[in-house]
Image (spheres, rainbow, N blue to C red):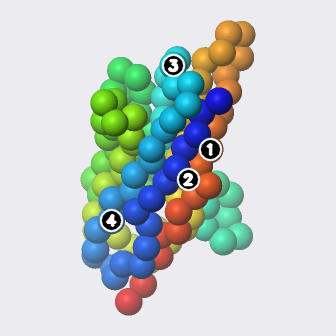
Amino acid sequence: QVQLVESGGGLVQPGGSLRLSCAASGTILNIFNMGWYRQAPGKQRELVAQITSSDITNYADSVKGRFTISRDNAKNTLYLQMNSLKPEDTAVYFCNANQLRVPTVIAYWGQGTQVTVSS
């Protein structure tokens, strides 16, 4: 089992910044990628950014150039630096980890952290 705990959400004005953190614990071997997803009211959950075990990153077009995903393996923590925030970034942000357990893949999710961008 893998436990994921997000933190760092809050209320910020348009143009501001926030950094989300996701602390992973438990049996964290064979996690081949981690990412951030978000879900706004009335919308489907969508991928925001993802990072592989080889540090290959992938971003949604809507956040490219503004958000940066990174991780600290020593601290088992995933980060999402969010700059130039817009009202449309308002959502609950979820941390995700995908673990290879042959022959299948197990997806783990955090409880989510609210990000509100408003003046």
Q: Residue furthest front?
A: 26
Q: Quadrant of residue 63?
A: bottom left
Secondary structure under the numbered disc 4 in the rendered image: strand
Above or below for 86 versus 81 = below
Disc on the earlier residue, 3 or 2: 3
Q: Quadrant of residue 86?
A: bottom left
- Residue matched to label 1: 109
Contact? badges 1 and 2 (CB < 8 Å):
yes
- Residue matched to label 4: 18
Disc on the earlier residue, 4 or 1: 4
Rendered residue at 39%/40% (across/down): 77
Q: Amino acid at mark 1?
A: Trp
* Front of the two marks 1 and 3: 3
Above or below for 32 versus 96 = above
- Residue matched to label 3: 29
Work out whether residue 37 or residue 76 is closer to the camera in this orientation and state it.
76
Contact? badges 4 and 3 (CB < 8 Å):
no
Disc on the earlier residue, 4 or 3: 4
Image location of residue 51, percent across then percent down: 41, 33
Secondary structure under the numbered disc 1 in the rendered image: strand
Disc on the earlier residue, 1 or 3: 3
Disc on the earlier residue, 1 or 2: 2
